[in-house]
Image (cartoon, rainbow, N blue to C red):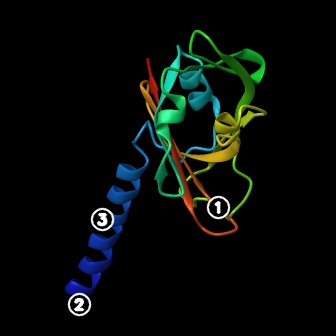
Amino acid sequence: MKRLFIYPALAMVFFMNTASMCSSDSSSSSSSDPTPVINTATQGTWKVTSYIDSGTDETNHFTGYNFTFGSNNVLTATNGTNTYQGSWSVSTDDSNDDNPSSDLDFNIAFGSPADFFDLTDDWDVTTYSSTTISLIDVSGGNGETDILIFTKN
């Protein structure tokens, strides 16, 4: 009879420890509060260190550009010669068809040029830290995956 009591008790201890371990990662995107990601993005300038468009590496389209996530949702990309403006925001993900592990969308919009227009999407935040913001988008139409990684300058 004592054995029957021990197994459920051990299982409960295991699940409590697992839950507390999962919730302790401060750079996890499991929170639905966009404020920490916004605060991270607005600190300094960033560069695209990886842009994979449906399996094709297109990072070179952004070489030499610095991205500034400014106030009033203004996103600026400049390489010293060319400057492009777009918009950005971080919002709570309100759909269930995106990456289920992400509660936040990192929204980017550029009207031109074509290479920057490719960044226009509601990206899922996979991870972020003071030096890196990693984003992913799974296309609803064909299921292809795009990956975008910003690294702080």
Quarter placement of the C terminus: top left
Q: Residue at x 63, y 44 (%)?
A: 32
Mark identifier at residue 14:
3
The amino acid marked with disc number 1 is Ser
| Quarter occupied by residue 18 | bottom left
Circle 2 or circle 3, nearest the eye: 3
- The disc, 2 or 3, on the residue closer to the chain's N-terminal end is 2
- Residue located beneath label 1 in the image: 139
Disc number at residue 1?
2
Where in the figure is residue 72, as x and y percent of width and height?
A: 78, 18
Identify whether 120 is placed above or below 22.
above
Residue depicted at x 49% and y 20%: 64
Question: Label 2 amino acid?
Answer: Met
Sort mark 2 into few (<14), some (14-19) or many (20+) by Cα contacts within 10 Å. few
The x, y position of residue 49, in whole percent, is 43, 33
Could you say whether the residue bearing mark 2 is in a helix, strand or loop? loop
Q: Nearer the viewer, residue 74 or 23?
A: 74
Which quarter of the rendered picture does the N terminus lie within? bottom left
In the rendered structure, the answer to whether residue 145 lies left or right of residue 83 reads left
Looking at the image, is mark 1 or mark 2 earlier in the sequence?
A: 2
Question: Crowding at label 1, few (<14), some or many (≥20) Cα neighbours within 10 Å?
Answer: few
